[in-house]
Amino acid sequence: MTDWLLDAVLGLLLLGLAGGALHVRQLYAGVLLFIAFGLVLALVWARLGAADLALAECRDFLHQHWR
């Protein structure tokens, strides 16, 4: 029963983060929202059973932001 609730929360969180990253005026806040979007997207991919995409999303995150 809570599976659909978790999926709905993750979906709404993704939409909110995407909208916030596109419409925020400060560059730093936009970058932070985009990073959070990538991490939540990795959770969504893992939730959908696409572990390869989830790992690729995390790898891209680590490669771009922690060089």
Image (spheres, rainbow, N blue to C red):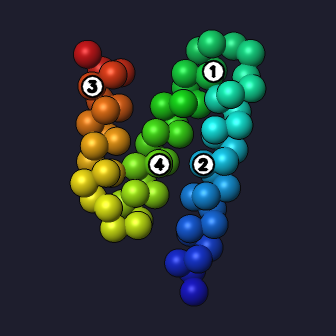
Q: CA distance from mark 2 to mark 3?
A: 21 Å
Rendered position, 15 above or below 65: below
Residue 18 pos. (x, y %): 64, 38
Viewer-nearest of discs 1 and 2 = 2
What is the crowding at mark 1: few (fewer than 14 residues within 10 Å), some, or many (at least 20)? few
Residue 46 pos. (x, y %): 36, 60
Residue 22 pos. (x, y %): 68, 28
Residue on which disc 1 sits? 29
Q: Earlier in the sequence, mark 2 or mark 3?
A: 2
Give SS at disc 1. Answer: helix
Left or right position of 67 against 27: left
What is the crowding at mark 4: few (fewer than 14 residues within 10 Å), some, or many (at least 20)? many
Quarter holding the C terminus?
Answer: top left
Three-letter code, disc 2? Leu
Residue on which disc 3 sits? 63
Q: Determine the image quadrant of residue 66.
A: top left
Three-letter code, disc 4? Leu
Q: Earlier in the sequence, mark 4 or mark 1?
A: 1
Q: CA distance from mark 1 to mark 2?
A: 16 Å
Residue found at x 57% / y 86%: 1
Q: CA distance from mark 4 to mark 1?
A: 18 Å
Give SS at disc 4. Answer: helix
Residue on which disc 4 sits? 41
Residue 14 image label:
2
Q: Earlier in the sequence, mark 1 or mark 3?
A: 1
Q: CA distance from mark 4 to mark 3?
A: 16 Å
